Amino acid sequence: MLLKNIKIVIFTLVFVQFSIQSIAQNYWQQQIDYKIDVQMDTRKHQYSGEQKLVYYNNSPDTLYKVYFHLYPNAFQPGSMMDIRSQNLLDPDRRVLDRIGKLSEDEIGYLKVSSMLQEGQELNLRTSQTILIVQLNNPIPPKSSTSFSLAFEGQVPLQIRRNGRDSFEGIDYSMAQWYPKMAEYDDKGWHTSPYVAREFYAPWGNFEVDITIDKSYVIAGTGILQNPNEVGYGYEKEGVKVKRKGSKLTWKFKAENVHDFVWAADKEYTQLTAQVQEGPLVRFFYVPGEETKNWELLPQYVVPAFEYAQEHYGKYGWDEYSIIQGGDGGMEYPMATLVANKKPTGVRSMKSLLGTVFHEMMHSWYQGMIATDESYFAWMDEGFTSYADATMENEVLGKDNPFPLERSYKTYYRWANSGNEEPSSTHSDHFYTNTGYSVATYTKGAMALDILGYIIGNRNRDQGLLRYYNEWSFKHPDEQDLIKVMEKESDIELSWFFDYWIHSTKTTDYSIDNISTTAKATQSKIHLSKLGQMPMPIDLIVTKANGEEVLYYIPLAMMLGEKPNETELNRISCDEWPWTHPEYELIIDIPTTEIKKIEIDPSKRMPDIDQSNNILELDQEKEQ
Ligand SMILES: [Zn+2]
């Protein structure tokens, strides 16, 4: 028996290896190693540093230029972020016109004073938040080069995501603070200026040394390398920490991440909790009346991690830090910044947990499975929203059979408003913030719920694990996801994403009427496709005696059927071609025995007008 098991294990290993190789054949990604040494001047709120980079060009292309993001430059009057915010119909309340009012010592900036490639000075040009670097020595395919640069920055007054002196008093939220190399992939360079949204960068390793006045406690991405010199709850039990001099250097290392965030405050306290076969979770917050709820976080976050690892794949690093900071909730690799206050006041436990669960799930959909947020925000915000809703339902014992219900309601309101824009719109280019939010968070979350309706929940769940197995620590895009789900379900799916993500076409089916056929033992149900987005149909007929029969009408272009996941007897009907506006369903139940006909009682099919989805027959009157 043991031998047999070993054989199975070997077979599985070979198979997994083979499937990874089959992706790797065409797939490549850039790689970068950062060594950053930064000195923080907390009196002027400025910092200066040196950055050494080794950049691996794994692409088949020669690179003549490289680009870096200089995000802090967005926080200057007249910047693209400032003017955009002042011209949006529904600007973010945290931004409004606040950037335009920043004084010289309150603005943010990041300047690269010099850059060398292999010791040779390079020509630099800055456009807003993008640094354009003309290379003396082009980087040939499959080779590496080194850069070293000096930078100077000023931490802006907290406006959005990063900054100093947040409205709840956190000293430094240091997100997007260093010259961050832009990503180059099979679609070319990704150099979106920082207008509102920001995530997409090469995978790499970070060694970051931060020197700061020793009264500050630092929390951030990575693993602290000198805990016994630093203390503040990082030190090993029993170690007495002596902090000599006026400054301390904090040494962090992070492997296989695509960003590095940190935060500093003089009053941070630290709690820790260990997830079994998972990360050590660190919680940093300023203790007090307003942060009482933070003391309760570990008891929810540990089971949440267990749930997430079981359903979405293993968390990829040894530590995760939940840090009071920023201005809402924002995900970074191995860490998140979560504000304890909203503009309306201190967060409730419900709101705090909701945000923590959301940011935590970003460790999967963004932290490990790193999609390009500009073009596929629906795959990170949406999938994260789907995962946090289902996780919260389970971990908090809510037992809601339809955890995505609120998303559907939001979507129907927006779809019927006429203001909808396709989810495939670049994140910064939506006409409204609401449009972005519904297209990405809401429709992205619903995409997975609807996928459950189309291919079955089990196939969808297995597909998500397969997506994790094949694409974690890489940059998948929409096509990669579709392929995974098609393989898992043996159902063709491009059509769904074409409609749901690339258009604003909507679904509306109706049950028009029912009549008796020439055979009195049969009934004929007339259905219409009124909306332009087609869907397979689950139709439940309830007999007068209470018995329910499920009729399943697959779409012709699915070229397959989902498994029956209900306890009902299912009758598979002829497929419905999307080109055909009408469908006649003949069923072996006499009309006189039918009480009710209903399309998709699970409500997962996104039908924008459900008033025509039910037909009830008043049998008593007719008899
Ligand atoms: Zn999010």
Image (cartoon, rainbow, N blue to C red):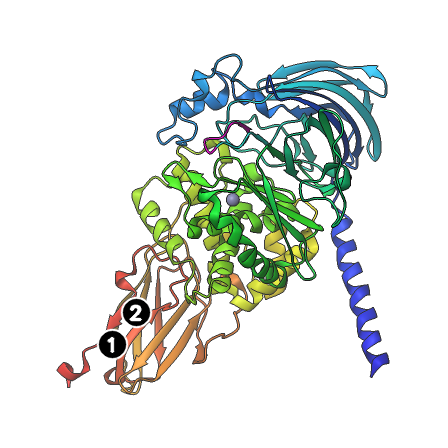
**Which one is in front, 293 or 551?**
293
- The single residue placed furthest to the left in the displayed view is 621
**Which one is in front, 195 or 212?**
212
Q: x and y percent of residue 260 in the render?
A: 67, 36
Q: Earlier in the sequence, mark 1 or mark 2?
A: 1
Please tell me whether residue 395 is drawn above or below residue 157 in the rendered image: below
Q: x and y percent of residue 539 in the render?
A: 37, 71
Identify the residue at horizontal 32%, vertical 62% (top origin).
Answer: 528
> Is 438 in the magenta?
no
> Is 167 in the magenta?
yes
Please tell me whether residue 71 is drawn above or below residue 288 in the rendered image: above
Secondary-structure class at tag 1: strand
Label 1 sits on residue: 515
Q: The N terminus is located in which quarter?
A: bottom right
Name the mark on residue 336: none
Q: The C terminus is located in which quarter?
A: bottom left
- The answer to the question of whether label 1 and label 2 lie on touching residues, with beta carbons closer than 8 A, is yes
Q: Residues within 10 Å of mark 1 (few under 14, many from 20)?
A: some
User: Is the stretch drawn in magenta largely helix, strand or loop?
Assistant: loop
Residue type pointed to by label 2: His
Please tell me whether residue 18 is drawn above or below residue 517 in the rendered image: above
Label 2 sits on residue: 526
Residue range (magenta) = 163-168
Quarter residue 27 falls in? top right
- CB at disc 2 and ligand 1 closer than 8 Å: no
Tell me if residue 69 can be seen: yes
Identify the residue at horizontal 85%, vertical 18% (top origin).
Answer: 119
Secondary-structure class at tag 2: strand
Q: CA distance from mark 1 to mark 2?
A: 8 Å
